[in-house]
Image: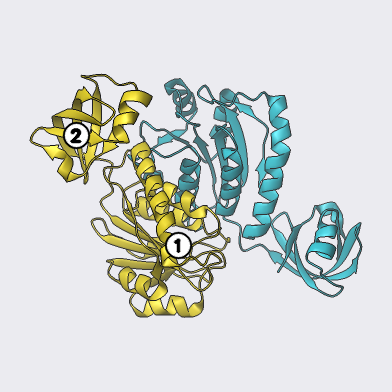
Chain colours: A yellow, B cyan
């Protein structure tokens, strides 16, 4: 069933109103009709709805039933991702959303080849957030994972430490993800380097704030492969995949 | 250190000879010189060598020491991958090699949109094998994982069943990978569908031959994400990542 996301303010009583571009998508691309069923998600809750009215401007839906999304993991994983080259972050965002990430925080580390300013990055961020939205629809998420603004390493280290399980993937090795004791209903932060990985001082900054350095085995993973491997393993170890 | 692969016949006594295109790469791109150190891999063994002579045609290396590669997983994983659309198989091959796969066997299933004949596929296969070679060099593998010819579902089901742990990822759900009892020093086969997944009859064909249907959680993974998630989890569960 087609799946859309709405904000809380779109709900009034037993109805929810979808606006552009969803209204165009529903009416023109999907050619849906009055009475057709769609799913509208809002903050982890899924509403089964029947379409009441359709126009290019808005689609009003009657809520038939609702339940908490069964597709959301019971861990909140924040991916701190050092800015990779080219459009690799697009791929990382798309796949991380499929795999169940909650937040993605891009970080500018010493070895980032891409040297975007925070201002430059804001332009990219809008595109990345759209990629996250589309991936959330396609993969059946109950929330839209958020792509944050560009962080410094110091900011990332601090926010990483706020998680129940702060982890940093270090190419020079570390604990196995299976031995960290990850638990359900917890917050997990994972910091992944760009091409060339991390400076030792960056890893030390994170571990001195409580993060655990983890290793992803002896093979060298590309910077877009590492986050997907780490997320897959974390979701499996916590019973969410 | 630069890493190259050679076949057994390239070794004579305490020397190994690399030919084109490696000789061009060593002499021209890397601008290496006589006496420089390189690693030559052959069937899981790594040879530390010093360059004795360089020409465009060949590079002769003296073997200084050798050891079995420490980067190879102790499980032999064969990925049976239903042919996806476009160039997604390129990405899957590259990432699967990084993650430690041993063999990749493309399969033509009912829901494959790409309907390549075995003959058409042979042209693609050469390119895929080159991608596997490059990924093996970059990720530090001790072997070059092999990309096989295009299989029918019946052939894939039969070859899948020859593994100690034959697994098929079913979008309609199945066992959790963590509950399958995967063991070290075993052979593991993983069959992954294309866009749209598998026909029920295809899954039944595999399970009737002994395969276990596994699920990768409630979120819908794209067909290029599923193999990478499954491989990451398998490598972690067997202590190889």
Residue A232 visible here: yes
Both marks 2 and 1 on one chain: yes
Q: Earlier in the sequence, mark 2 or mark 1?
A: 2
Q: Is residue A27 above or below residue B68?
A: above
Query: What's the chain of the residue with tag 2?
Result: A
Left or right: B16 with respect to B115?
Answer: right
Q: Is residue A153 above or below residue A105?
A: below
Residue B14 visible here: no
Task: Tell me where residue A69 sits by quadrant.
Answer: top left
Marker disc for residue A17: 2
Marker disc for residue A120: 1
A133, A55: nearer the viewer = A55
Query: Helix, strand or loop at disc 1?
Result: helix
- x and y percent of residue A237 in the render? 35, 54
- x and y percent of residue B23 in the render? 85, 59
Left or right: A2 with respect to B106?
Answer: left
B139, A140: nearer the viewer = A140
- Say few, some or many: other residues with alpha carbon within 10 Å of mark 2 (under 14 / 14 to 19 / 20 or more): many
- x and y percent of residue A179 in the render? 38, 64
């Amino acid at each position: 069933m087609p799946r859309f996301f709405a904000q809380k303010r779109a709900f009034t009583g037993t109805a929810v109103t979808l606006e552009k571009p969803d209204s165009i998508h529903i009416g023109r691309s999907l050619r849906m009709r009055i009475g057709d069923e769609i799913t509208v998600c809002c903050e982890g809750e899924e509403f089964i709805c029947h379409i009441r009215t359709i126009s290019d401007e808005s689609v009003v839906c009657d809520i038939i039933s609702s339940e908490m999304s069964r597709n959301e993991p019971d861990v909140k994983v924040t991916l701190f991702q050092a800015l990779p080259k080219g459009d690799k972050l697009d791929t990382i965002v798309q796949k991380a959303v499929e795999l169940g990430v909650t937040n993605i925080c891009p970080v500018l580390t010493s070895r980032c080849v891409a040297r975007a300013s925070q201002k430059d990055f804001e332009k990219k961020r809008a595109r990345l957030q759209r990629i996250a939205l589309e991936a959330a629809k396609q993969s059946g998420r109950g929330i839209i994972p958020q792509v944050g603004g560009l962080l410094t390493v110091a900011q990332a280290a601090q926010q990483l430490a706020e998680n129940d399980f702060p982890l940093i993937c270090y190419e020079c090795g570390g604990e196995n993800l299976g031995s960290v004791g990850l638990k359900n209903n917890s917050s997990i932060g994972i910091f992944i380097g760009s091409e060339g990985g991390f400076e030792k001082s960056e890893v030390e900054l994170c571990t001195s704030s409580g993060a655990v350095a983890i290793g992803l085995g002896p093979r060298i993973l590309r910077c877009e492969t590492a986050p997907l491997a780490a997320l897959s393993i974390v979701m499996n170890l916590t019973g969410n995949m």
